[in-house]
Amino acid sequence: MRLLSILKPGLFIYECVRVLLLVLILILQGNQPEPVIRVLFAAPSALFPLMALFIWLDIDRYKVFVPLYLAGKSIGIFLELGWSIISRQGTMIGSLNFTSIVAQLILSGDLFALAAAIMIYKCLQKPDMEEK
């Protein structure tokens, strides 16, 4: 139970930082053509901090959001990996491009967020030992 009290706010803080980084990338690349398409692809990311906030505030009431959060993170990781492979992105060490570095940091953060959400989900599945 102590682990959940650290994971839930940590998940929310990570999601807020992630959205702020995505907004920063959109602002820095605003002079490139088709910024509206980038905004459309980044807009669903605003739902993840909301889900993390609800999971943090009242896990019993909003526990149905955890599988939705897991599905969204899994799809996001799959898409980010596909984009990295298709665009032939180098590693963080190999390239000094700010956008690729931030994208790879977000990908690794998403992996940790997925792991944290899986731990939260597993703790919800266990029956509470204190009730016996």
Image (spheres, rainbow, N blue to C red):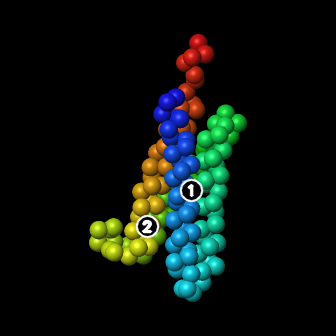
Question: Relative to 61, is 132 above or below?
Answer: above
- Residue extending furthest right? 61
Left or right: residue 39 versus residue 1 is right
* Percent of width and height locating residue 63: 65, 38
Instruction: Give the CA separation, mark 2 to mark 1.
Output: 15 Å
> What is the three-letter code of the residue carrying label 1?
Cys
Residue 22, quarter of picture:
bottom right
- Residue extending furthest top? 132
Query: Which residue is at a point 57% across and 31% down the rendered structure image?
Result: 125
Query: Which residue is at a point 53% across and 70% down the rendered structure image?
Result: 24
Element type where label 2 sits in the image: helix
Residue 47 seen anywhere in this rendered image of the structure: yes
Q: Counting other residues with Cα less than 10 Å from the Cα at mark 2, is it few (<14), some (14-19), or many (20 or more)?
A: some
Query: Which residue is at a point 55% across and 86% down the rendered structure image?
Result: 31
The residue to which callout 2 is attached is 102
- Earlier-in-chain disc, 2 versus 1: 1
Question: Relative to 1, is 69 above or below?
Answer: below
Element type where label 1 sits in the image: helix
The front one of 26 and 117 is 26
* Percent of width and height locating residue 76: 53, 60
Left or right: residue 111 versus residue 44 is left
Q: Of the residues tagged 2 and 1, which is closer to the observer? A: 1
The front one of 59 and 85 is 59
Residue 122 seen anywhere in this rendered image of the structure: no
> What is the three-letter code of the residue carrying label 2?
Val
Question: Relative to 89, is 70 above or below?
Answer: above
* Percent of width and height locating residue 112: 44, 49
Left or right: residue 113 versus residue 36 is left
The front one of 37 and 53 is 53
Query: Which residue is at a point 54% across and 85% down the rendered structure image?
Result: 32
Q: Quadrant of the C terminus?
A: top right
The residue to which callout 1 is attached is 16
